Image: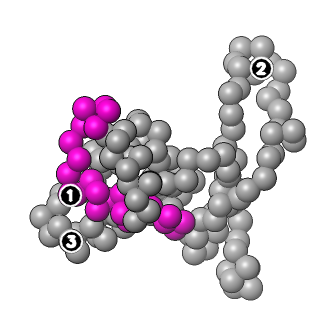
Amino acid sequence: MNTRYADRIVGKLRTEGLKVTPQRIAILNFLDGNRSHPSVDEIHREVLRAFPTISLATVYNTLETLEKMGVIRALCIDPTRKRFDPDTSLHHHARCDRCGTIRDVWGDLGPTLRLPDDVSREFVAEGASVSFRGHCRECVTYC
C-alpha cells in the first residue's frame, strides 16, 4: 500500500477520533488503487483471507465511515449492489449490462450537461456524476 495514501487515511481516522484497526487497514489495502469498483461482499471476501472472523457488518460500517470522511465514493451504478470507488477525483463511470464491468470515464462533461430551467430555478448544482450503461467491447459481440 502506498505509504502516503495509508498515512493520509490513517491520519484522517485519528483526526476524526476513530480507531485505526488492523481490519480497517486491510480494507484500505484492498481499496488502494483498486479500479474494479468492488462491492461490500467482494471486499469482505478478500479481507476474510487475513481476518477470518471479520463480519460483514464491520466491512459495511468501515465503508460507511470512509464514505462519510470523503475518502471513498459509493456508486449506485449497479442495480444489484452498491459499489465503492477509492478514487474520489471528478470522473464518471460506464457499466456493461451483460458482464457488470465498471470502467472509469475521464473527461469534463460539465459544459455539455445542463439542468433544465425549471429545476435550476429551485436547485443549485455543485457537481455531477454521470453513469453510462451499455456493453463493453467483449460483450457487444454476444448481444
- Find the distance from the CA under tag 1 to the CA under tag 3: 10 Å
Quadrant of the drawing holding the N terminus: bottom left
Nearer the N terminus, badge 1 or badge 3?
A: 1
Which residue in the protein does label 2 denote?
Answer: 120
Counting other residues with Cα less than 10 Å from the Cα at mark 3, is it few (<14), some (14-19), or many (20 or more)? few
Nearer the N terminus, badge 3 or badge 2?
A: 3
Seen from the viewer's position, the closer of residues 10 and 140 is 10
- Find the distance from the CA under tag 2 to the CA under tag 1: 46 Å
What is the residue that sits farthest to the right in this orientation? 112
Is 7 a magenta residue?
no
> Is the residue under label 1 in contact with that under label 2 (CB below 8 Å)?
no
Q: Quadrant of residue 4?
A: bottom left
Q: Is residue 137 left or right of residue 70?
A: right
> In what element is the residue under mark 3?
loop
Q: Which residues are magenta?
A: 14-36
Q: Is residue 128 left or right of residue 75?
A: right
Which residue in the protein does label 3 denote?
Answer: 50
Point out residue 64 in the picture as x, y percentages from the top left corner: 35, 42
- Find the distance from the CA under tag 3 to the CA under tag 2: 49 Å
